[in-house]
Image (cartoon, helix red, strand yellow):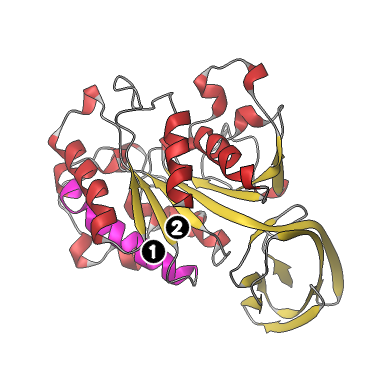
Amino acid sequence: MVTLNPIFSNGMVMQANKPVRIFGKGQGCVTVEFLGQTKNATSQKEWLVEFEPQEYGGPYTMTISLDGKKTELSDIYFGDVYLLSGQSNIQFKMWERKEPADVYEGNENVRLFTVDRMEENTEERWGVADGWVTLTEENAKDFSAIGYYMSQELAKNGHKVGLIACYQGASVIQSWLKKEVAQRAELQVENKFADHEWFPIWNDDGVLYDFMLSKIIPYAMASVIWYQGESNASVDEARIYLRFLDALTSSWREDFMDKDLKFIIIQLADYIERDTEGWHLVQKAQSEAQKKLKNVKTVVCRDVCEVDDIHPRSKKELSMRIAKALLG
């Protein structure tokens, strides 16, 4: 049986001005009708059809025939799509800021797709089965705080903003790499940070790549926002963290079929309980990333975030910086 990837659903936001890729799995015949064009594919295991880049706009409809069974998707827009990935500080929700509910604002131009995570009894309100969710006053509390503030700012230009939430608290960077990439000789270290052992379910090489990231490849997007490093703060890992970032950015660009895909790297804030050599070496690597890696910008947050919490609650000013970096 041939199937459609779940990211393609009613209300989806697709990246403007980049190739439009529709894909799925299974064995069978596929026909996609979209924007007055028809594309066909015959699949043995995985399938993909590609349309020409499109300008901002919508709403549109798409008809997909899977082995003769037709499905129509509606309310589709072309806007700007951003992948939120990393660990707990980008996963950090609006409700965790402990602000009153009356400060939340909905926005018809902001939509979110959440990739299922490995944790049982997760606090995630949505997952793949919910499809694309529009930001409302009622559900804003469950948005990533960075995603919420950042998208509100970016949506001021009137275009749709699509957020893809693909993150896991306490995750190591090796888990977000293909296993064969993570196991390259130049990425091997003897001493790893404790999170490798404390959260073994998702911290083996390639685990989160396979379970989460691979589910959305090669969906087109404007940029990746990467906020991670707390779980790689051993001295040995921190010394080569820039190599990890190089492997991540280059391999993800290949996977997403976008050699110029932009990355925003968020530098860790200072944290008084991790005033260690490893922590500072990770910060240094993140700072150097924009100078030494292609199409990467580093966003500094140490001057706008608390130092007494590994999960700083002040996310708004940081999010404004991320939005500025994305637009610059």
Q: Give residue 39's position: percent from left, percent from top.
A: 74, 82
Q: Which secondary structure, mark 1? A: loop
Question: At 58% across and 64% down in the image, what residue appears?
Answer: 219
Q: Tell me the chief SS of the magenta region.
A: helix
Q: Which mark is residue 178?
A: 1
Mark 1 Cα within 10 Å, few/some/many (few <14, many 20+)? Answer: many
**Tag count:** 2
User: Mark 2 is on which residue type?
Assistant: Tyr
Left of 236 or right of it: where is 7?
Answer: right
User: Disc 2 or 1, which lies upstream in sequence?
Assistant: 1
Label 2 – label 1 distance at C-alpha:
6 Å
Left of 234 or right of it: where is 12?
Answer: right
Say whether residue 215 is magenta. no
Q: Are marks 2 and 1 in contact (CB under 8 Å)?
A: yes
Q: Range of the magenta residues? A: 237-256
Q: Which secondary structure, mark 2? A: helix
Q: Which mark is residue 315?
A: none
The one of 270 and 326 positioned closer to us in this rendering: 326
Mark 2 Cα within 10 Å, few/some/many (few <14, many 20+)? Answer: some
**Picture layout, residue 43 above or below residue 199:** below
Instruction: Give the residue at mark 2.
Output: 209
Q: Give residue 149's position: percent from left, percent from top.
A: 54, 34
The one of 322 and 7 positioned closer to us in this rendering: 322
Q: Give residue 144's position: percent from left, percent from top.
A: 54, 35
User: Mark 1 is on which residue type?
Assistant: Lys
Question: At 57% across and 36% down in the image, what residue appears?
Answer: 148
Question: At 52% across and 32% down in the image, what residue appears?
Answer: 145
The one of 223 and 159 positioned closer to us in this rendering: 159
